[in-house]
Amino acid sequence: MERKRILIVDDDLGPARLLKLNLEETGCYEARVEPMAEDAVAAAREFEPHLVLLDVFMPRMPGGNVAAAFEADPTLKHIPVVFLTAAVQKHQVDEHEGVISNHPCLAKPASLDEIVRCIELNLSRKFERPPFRMHMLPKVVDNE
């Protein structure tokens, strides 16, 4: 069985590397961590992922811009991009039926089971999405 390649684009290296290890321990995935958002497109061209897990808030280049770069690239636009981010809370993701800014989304922290379910769902479906727009991200809600 071919292991699916998952590219994790996140500048928070500790949790990203842990996620990589946990995904690989399932035996179903090969994962790579790219901590530099501006290098995500080059990493995707080299690694040829089946799916990208993408943080939203990263230095130098926000995840929304990375998603837009994937959509603009004819060789990458077919790759599902899933936002895995603390920019939204779980209830916001649930209110939007798991889709934020036309992309599947998981709120951090997410369990490995939630992440695997999301990966499998998005690997199994083919969908067209309108172009990403930064204004479509919901505002972050304070816990106060």
Image (cartoon, rainbow, N blue to C red):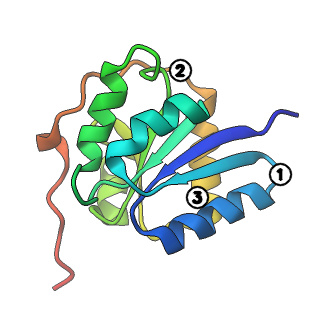
- Residue at the right extreme? 1
Residue that carries the numbered disc 3 in the rendered image: 114
Left or right position of 67 against 20: left
Q: How many marks?
A: 3
Above or below, 12 relative to 79? below
Mark 1–mark 2 distance (CA, rounded to whole Å): 24 Å
- Residue at the top extreme? 74
Element type where label 1 sits in the image: loop
Residue 87 visible in the current orientation:
yes
Q: Earlier in the sequence, mark 3 or mark 2?
A: 3
Mark 1 nearby-residue class (10 Å; few <14, some 14–19, many ≥20): few
Residue that carries the numbered disc 2 in the rendered image: 126
Q: Which residue is drawn at the image coordinates 19% and 48% (left, top)?
A: 137
Question: Which is more foreground, mark 1 or mark 3?
Answer: 1
Q: Earlier in the sequence, mark 1 or mark 3?
A: 1
Mark 3–mark 2 distance (CA, rounded to whole Å): 20 Å
Q: Earlier in the sequence, mark 1 or mark 2?
A: 1
Q: Quadrant of residue 129?
A: top left
Residue 102 visible in the current orientation:
no
